[in-house]
Amino acid sequence: MREVNIVTIQSLSIFYIKKYMTTSPCVQKCALEVDLVCRGCGRHINEIDSWDTMSPTDKENVFRIANKRLFKKLAKI
């Protein structure tokens, strides 16, 4: 069952990367964990802070890294 959910999330992730590349990946579920990573979007606080000044390529890279962080947390559930 968990594999289906992760595949669905990965598909949605690609959609959101394309849709929100130039805006923000924020999902309005902001809560920083102990490691300073947002529980909602998976970005580190430094990535959140510098988002507006990043190039589109940097934003895409951050978005992919953030999604990997979230998938890793999901795998532990």
Image: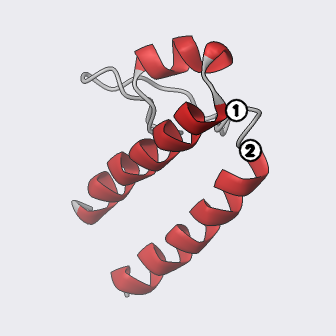
Task: Look at 55% across and 13% down and name the residue there.
Answer: 50
Residue 76, quarter of picture: bottom left
- In the image, 3: left or right of 30? left
Mark 1 and mark 2 residues within 8 Å of each other at the beta carbon? yes
Task: Look at 60% across and 21% down and name the residue there.
Answer: 54
Task: For mark 2, give the secondary structure.
Answer: helix
Q: Is residue 39 above or below residue 11?
A: above
Mark count:
2
The percent coordinates of residue 23 (x first, y second) are 76, 33
Tag 1: residue type? Ser
Residues 23 and 5: in front is 23
The percent coordinates of residue 18 (x first, y second) are 72, 55
Distance in Å between CA atoms under marks 1 and 2: 6 Å
Task: Look at 64% across and 38% down and name the residue there.
Answer: 25
Q: Is residue 6 above or below residue 26?
A: below
Residue 37: numbered disc: none
Residue 28, quarter of picture: top right
Residues 12 and 1: in front is 12
Q: Quadrant of the N terminus?
A: bottom left
The percent coordinates of residue 72 (x first, y second) are 28, 56
The 10 Å Cα crowd at callout 2, few under 14, some 14 to 19, many 20 or more, is some
Task: For mark 1, give the secondary structure.
Answer: loop
Task: Look at 58% across and 61% down and name the residue there.
Answer: 13
Tag 2: residue type? Tyr
Residue 20: numbered disc: 2
Q: Is residue 48 above or below residue 64?
A: above
The 10 Å Cα crowd at callout 1, few under 14, some 14 to 19, many 20 or more, is some
Residue 24: numbered disc: 1
Q: Quadrant of the C terminus?
A: bottom left
Q: Residue furthest left?
A: 76
